[in-house]
Amino acid sequence: MLSVEGLTVRSDGVPLVSDISLNIGPGERVGLIGESGSGKSLTALSLMGLLPEGVTASGKAEISGTPLVGVPEKQVKSLRGQKISMVFQEPMTALNPLMRVGAQVAEVMTLHGRPREDARARAVELFERVRLPHPAQIARSYPHQLSGGQRQRVMLAIALANEPDLLICDEPTTALDVTVQKQMLDLIAEVAPALLFITHDLAVVASVCERVLVMYGGRIVESGPMREVFTRPRHRYTEGLLAASKMAPRGTRLPTIKGSVPAAGHFPEGCVFRTRCPHSSPECETEPELTGDGHAYACWHPGE
């Protein structure tokens, strides 16, 4: 469904995301994890053609054989919502507060040529599909009249409206309570044709995804089957993330990764993680390549 090779995102010549390559097959669920500032959302926005002004993408990216990067805006608009869709992190800012939610779902379909009345009826069907109670009544509501979980389901209905080949979810459950979060995750796993799930919550990835990509400093530093990466991490950054996500015994300090993600344009030469890595050596001043069959990593001193 999705093929990406050498994707690079720049702002005023400064690389924000560098040389990203990934593939997602039909029905496959892939997680993209990393700290805030790692470049996860920028990667997704570049695939959607939604980068802010002054930020550009280069490289190769295709959805079902159709190019996504380096093509005219008119072509990107024809693909957005049709071949590839995205569920954003905060529905209250993504939804139009002045439009009824049913009309917002219908609008996505009319933009791609569906008759208005047919689109409105289909919107109610989609609300039922994403398990919103009283779908016809919900369709006449404004975003502020709905709960956070209901608004997120509306966003999911918008993303599914034209039956896209790939669904991108960018932290779709962050603002939801645990019970609603579980319901949303089960629903996404059930309805997504193919899925790229962006999050910093490792437990969410473990419950939804089959394969995982670990991102740091605008680069993918480790990738592989979810169970193998989470039980046998090779890159020291992945190792640190997993250690920090575990519960510490009472009276002991929580494990942490020292420092913070460098600002864009200030990533160190060589391994982007070396200034925070406890195993750093002079060898790490040379950038390691992503190597490995199935379970790949870019680290000079991988964990055992």
Image (cartoon, rainbow, N blue to C red):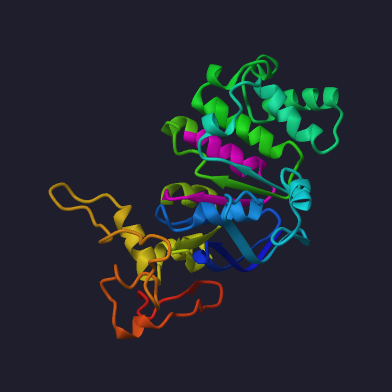
Name, please, the residue furthest toward the left. Answer: 251
Q: Nearer the viewer, residue 293 or 158?
A: 158
| Residue 242 belongs to the span the image colors magenta | no
From the top left corner, tell me how far across and down residue 105 is, in percent: 71, 29
Query: For the image shown, how many numbered marks are present on the structure?
Result: 0
From the top left corner, tell me how far across and down residue 152 is, in percent: 56, 32
- Residue at 36% across / 66% down in the picture? 237
- Location of residue 9 by image quarter: bottom right
From the top left corner, tell me how far across and down residue 55 is, in percent: 57, 56
- Location of residue 284 by image quarter: bottom left
| Residue 190 belongs to the span the image colors magenta | yes
Q: Point out the stretch of residues depicted in magenta.
A: 181-201
Q: Nearer the viewer, residue 26 or 260?
A: 260
Name, please, the residue furthest toward the bottom. Answer: 283
Q: Nearer the viewer, residue 133 or 260?
A: 260
- Residue at 47% across / 61% down in the picture? 227
- Residue at 47% across / 52% down in the picture? 206
State the quadrant of the N terminus.
bottom right
- Location of residue 258 by image quarter: bottom left
